[in-house]
Image (spheres, grey):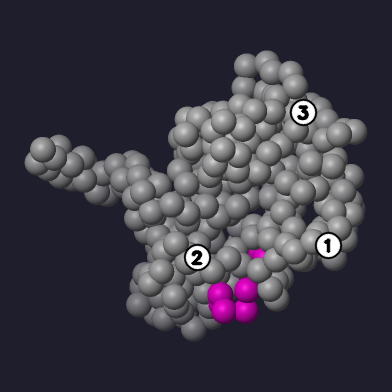
Amino acid sequence: MKIKKAIIPVAGLGTRFFPATKAIAKEMLPIVDIPCVQFLVEEAVQSGIEEIIFIVSEDKPQIEKHFTEQTRLNELLKKSGKTRELAHLQDIENRAHFHFVIQDKPLGDGHAILCATDIIKDDDFAVLFGDDIYDSNPPALKQLIKIYEKHNSPVISLQKVSKSETHKYGIIDPKKSQDRLHEISKLVEKPSPAEAPSNLAITGKYIITNNLYKSLQQANSHTKDGELRIIDGMKKFVKSSPIYGYEIEGDHFDTGDKLGYLKAIIHFGLKNKTMGGELKKHLKDLDLK
C-alpha cells in the first residue's frame, strides 16, 4: 500500500510561546519567511503525499487561510504586477488536497488522530507533528516510507539524545538494531535518566498502519483521564506486532522549544540565498565573549 495521506495535528494552544501565540497559531510562526507548518507540508508533498488532514481547533483560522485560495488577495497581487508572489501563493494552494478537521477539546495527540477517521478510512498513513522540522535529503518522511515499504509495519522517527534529556521525550527500548534501524521492544513516555531503556527518542513523525490505528481506537476506550496519546496504542500493539524506529539522516530542529526555534531560524537563514551571506558576516562580527 502506498502512503498517500498525512495527518498534521495543529490544535494545541502553544502556551510555551505566549504571548506571541495568543492570537496566532504557533505553527504559523515563521522561520525566516516560511511558517513552520509549511515545512511539514513541503516535506509531505516531496514524499509523495496527496492528501493532508490538518487537525485544528476553532480558534486557529490562520492555518486554513494559508493553505486555501484567497481570491481577493490573489486579485490584488495580479493587479499590482506581483506575479512572483502570486505564483508562490498558488503553488502553496495547489501542493495537495487539504482537509481541516476540528478537535473540540485538547484530549491528546492520539485523540487528535482519531478525529480524522472518516477521511483515513482503512488506509495506512503518515503523521507529522508541527514541532519537528528536519533539513534532510531525502525528506525525513520519505526515509520512513522507505522503511515502511520494506517491512510493511509501523515506523517512527528517532534521534539520539543525551541521557539527561530523556524526560522530555518518548523513549524506545530496541529489541534488534542495524545501523539506524531499530525494531522496538517497548516504548516509555518521558522516563527519568535512571529509568530510560536507551537514549533513542521519538521525534514526531510516524507511519501508522491500519492495524495500529485499530489498536489506538481500542486504547481510546480504556483511557482513565480522557486523554489519549499515540504511544498508548503503540504500547499494546508492539506486544504482538513489530514497530520499527529509524534515526533520520539530517538536521533536526524542535521548534516547539524556544532555543530550538531560534536555531532553526539561524540554520535556514544561513541557507537563504538573499541574505545568508550577510547573516553569516553578522554572526562572525558578534562579540560573544
Answer above or below: position of 234 versus 68.
above
Residue shown at 61% from the left, 67% from the top? 11
Q: Which secondary structure lies at badge 1?
A: helix
Residue 285 image point, x, y percent:
10, 40
- Magenta range: 51-61
Which image quadrant: the N terminus?
top right
Where is mark 3, residue-wise?
185
Where is mark 2, residue-wise?
14
Check if residue 52 falls in the magenta segment. yes
Which image quadrant: the C terminus?
top left
Q: Is residue 227 left or right of residue 219?
A: left
Where is mark 1, residue-wise?
117
Residue 61 seen in the figure: yes
Q: Is residue 88 left or right of residue 120?
A: left
Q: Nearer the viewer, residue 21 or 30?
A: 21
| Circle 3 crowding by C-alpha within 10 Å: few under 14, some 14–19, many from 20 | some
The mark closer to the camera, 3 or 2, is 3
Distance from the alpha carbon under mark 1 to that under mark 3? 27 Å
Residue shown at 36% from the left, 49% from the top? 259
- Amino acid type of the residue tagged 1 in the rendering: Thr
Residue 65 seen in the figure: no
Query: In the rendered structure, are the residues bearing label 1 and label 3 in contact, judged by CB atoms less than 8 Å apart?
Result: no
Counting the numbered discs, the total is 3
Of the numbered discs 3 and 2, the one sitting upstream in the chain is 2
Answer above or below: position of 115 versus 36.
below
Residue shown at 76% from the left, 65% from the top? 226
The mark closer to the camera, 2 or 1, is 2
Answer above or below: position of 36 versus 47.
below
